[in-house]
Amino acid sequence: MSESDTVNLRELWLKGLANDRAEHAAGEKAKVGNLRAGDSGAMSRQGDIIGGCPRRAYVRTQLGLEVESPEPSNLLMFELGKANEVVWVDKLKRSWEGTIRCEEEIPIAWSTRSGMRVTGRPDIVLCDKAGKPVLGIEHKAICSVWTAKSATFGNQPKVKHVVQAAHYAWQLRIPYRLVYTQYVNYAVPQWAGRMFASKPEHVELNDKGEVKHVKPHETVYEIHISDEGQVLYRLEPPVGGDDSDHPYTATPVNVADIERFYEYTSQMHERKVLGQRPKSVNIDGSKAGYDECSYCPLSEVCNKHENSWDRWIENVRRQIEGY
């Protein structure tokens, strides 16, 4: 038996994931105290929150803890997100005539009135030949047929994704694109076929003419900020299409709301008040058909200790750190 016969490849893979996670955790510790653009949310003047959650942002930036469990299945999904950006950069380098800067190469940073820093690393920024930023790109991988249903077939990008892209557009002062990319076929349940009929170019039909699955594709949204700070969006017009045929749609988000979200989050420790939970809404402001909090690992802690800051902190630590 050769040495190669004794190698357990999955063991090596899991060890590599663990080592990568350890490196990530070490990097996160160095950022404790900084709020992140990846946690972008918006707070209205009335205190309503959409997009990101200040509680989750606080846990990450002030307690230095990761809300999501580092299970191999979660880590594997994160890898797809990273690979998605690599694929796009590879192709854009073959077509863009300027330069391309990513992540740490073009960071953003600003400070709240309390002095807390807000930092972020844009996925991709296209620059001209002189290195001046021209267009920013926020990437999201479609990892569910239901994400495809809303983001592609329903023309409804997720609120938190639009807010994050708008945050970068605001700080970099450039136009932005929010790109959803699907790399595999997703089977469509027979009863749901009609939900995917709006864009026949993205589906494959069975012998009965029914939607069989959603094909790999990309969906691109333009994110625009008006002179008044209002965040607008629209589907990117087809190649060679007329822009006038694709008007922008206003969102319930203003850049002042994004700034207000971070101002509030930066003062949570001093106030010791959790504040409102994020509202589950669609990008047009209508009520979403799901509860965002029900998908959060901290939902049970919030349910039990909604009105006690100290008990909430104690139980968040117990759940994540396992003591």
Image (cartoon, helix red, strand yellow):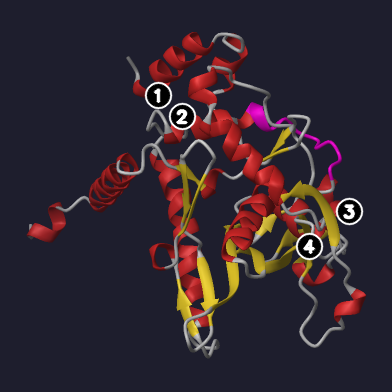
Mark 4–mark 2 distance (CA, rounded to whole Å) = 33 Å
Q: Residues within 10 Å of mark 3 (few under 14, many from 20)?
A: few
Residue of label 4: 226
Mark 2 lies on residue: 59
Q: Amino acid at mark 1?
A: Ile
| Residues packed near mark 1 inside 10 Å, few (<14), some (14 to 19) or many (20 plus) | some
In space, the residues marked 4 and 1 are separated at their CA atoms by 41 Å
Tell which tag, 3 or 4, sits nearer the viewer: 4
Residue bearing mark 3: 194
Closer to the eye: label 4 or 2: 4
Q: Tell me: residue 223, above or below residue 23.
A: below
> Could you tell me residue 212's position as x and y percent?
76, 59
Looking at marks 3 and 4 on the same chain, the residue that comes earlier in the sequence is marked by 3
Residue 41 left/right relative to 245: left
Q: Residue at x 84, y 84 (%)?
A: 241
Q: Amino acid at mark 4?
A: Ser
The answer, for residue 216, to whether it is visible in the render is no
Q: Is residue 45 left or right of residue 286?
A: left
**Label 1 sits on residue:** 320
Q: Residues within 10 Å of mark 4 (few under 14, many from 20)?
A: few
293 within the magenta span: yes
User: Residue 142: x percent and y percent?
Assistant: 62, 56
Magenta stretch in the rendered image: 285-294
Mark pair 3, 2: CA separation:
41 Å
Question: Is there a contact, CB below 8 Å, between mark 2 and mark 1?
Answer: yes
Distance Cα–Cα, label 2 vs label 1: 10 Å
Q: Quadrant of the C terminus?
A: top left
Q: Amino acid at mark 2?
A: Val
Ranked by sequence position, the earlier of labels 2 and 1 is 2
